Amino acid sequence: MSEFLTGVFNITPTPFHPDGSLDLESLTRLTAFTRETGVQGMTILGVLGEADKLTEAERDRVIETTLAAAGDGFAICVGTTHAGTDGCIAYSRRAQALGARAVMVAPPKLARSNDAALHRHYVAVAEALDIPVVVQDFPPAVGGITMSPELIGGLAKASARLVTLKLEDEPSPQKVSQVLAVNPAVRVMGGLGGMMFLEELRHGAVGTMTGFAFPEILVAIARAWTAGDRDRATAVFYKYCPLIRFENQPRINLALRKHIYHRRGVIASPRVRAPFAPVDDATLADLDDLLTRLGLAGRGAVTIA
């Protein structure tokens, strides 16, 4: 059921016009561009997609526009996190009805971590659907709620729809090993902007689901790794680590990614909806210098040598 959730799934931002309204033309272009980079699929309406800043009507428009642009054979995963189980089920059923191949769900915020409550939440969502649920383990996004390896392994055992994990609990490579030791059936996808992608692969991850704005770099790493060329995978990762690190700076990573997609000619505006942390001119100058030194300053797709 979840075999297609492997390799690189690019988490994309939601484009806005300078006035803050949805830019569906840019979204269509972004979807086509993302598919052309060679990724296995695309994830929308995650944290990077500013899902919490959209109305329900806007959510539908983003899903519908993305699916229409994606075409056949390109998997779209939709973020459907909600504070309540019923709300999460409603969001997830709506995404499924519109044509999503999978949904991604982070834990609901609780007063404190509670494995039993989280288990009930995820199983209820999975039982309400016919498509996979990607379990997102990202404590900073949900008030520090942590998911133990035992909980994650138990979810995969409880439902075939819960075998895929998007792991963003640091140190992530170590937790990949811990989760697989509990249940080798879990299919672990990394995250965190790709910062630990190579190490996650070494520890048993099957890919990554992240928002790095040069997904073709991650595709090159994944393809080399899958082909058994560990030296090339390592060389590509080490070459572009400075950009991966720079782009994933806390609080400004979303804005930086939008600036990169804007510079690449993919989206018309780098607008982020308020409230957000702006990027100053000096930081953007640092970005331009880095892109130039890595040979990535042009528009459009790049070939990874």
Image (cartoon, rainbow, N blue to C red):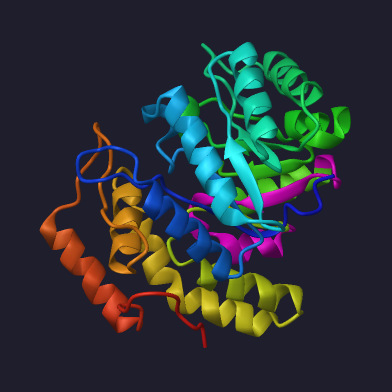
Picture quadrant of residue 54:
top left
> Is residue 259 placed above or below 2 in the rendered structure?
below
Residue 274 is at least partly visible in this image? yes
Where's residue 243, x and y in %? 37, 68
Residue 171 is at least partly visible in this image? no
Name the side, left or right, on which 177 lies relative to 95: right
The extreme left residue here reads: 281
Where's residue 176, x and y in %? 69, 49
Q: Nearer the viewer, residue 213 or 235?
A: 213
The verdict on residue 41 being magenta is: no
Q: How many marks?
A: 0
The extreme bottom residue here reads: 305
> Is residue 198 placed above or below 44 in the rendered structure?
below
Name the side, left or right, on which 262 lies relative to 165: left
| x 76%, y 38%: residue | 132
| x 62%, y 77%: residue | 233
Name the side, left or right, on which 52 lies relative to 66: left
> Is residue 88 placed above or below 15 in the rendered structure?
above
Give the position of the N terminus as an image quadrant.
Answer: top right
> Is residue 181 placed above or below 158 in the rendered structure?
below
| x 74%, y 33%: residue | 152
Picture quadrant of residue 242:
bottom left
Where's residue 142, x and y in %? 49, 26
Where's residue 83, x and y in %? 53, 16
| x 87%, y 32%: residue | 157
Q: Specify start and end residues of the magenta stretch as a single range.
A: 182-204
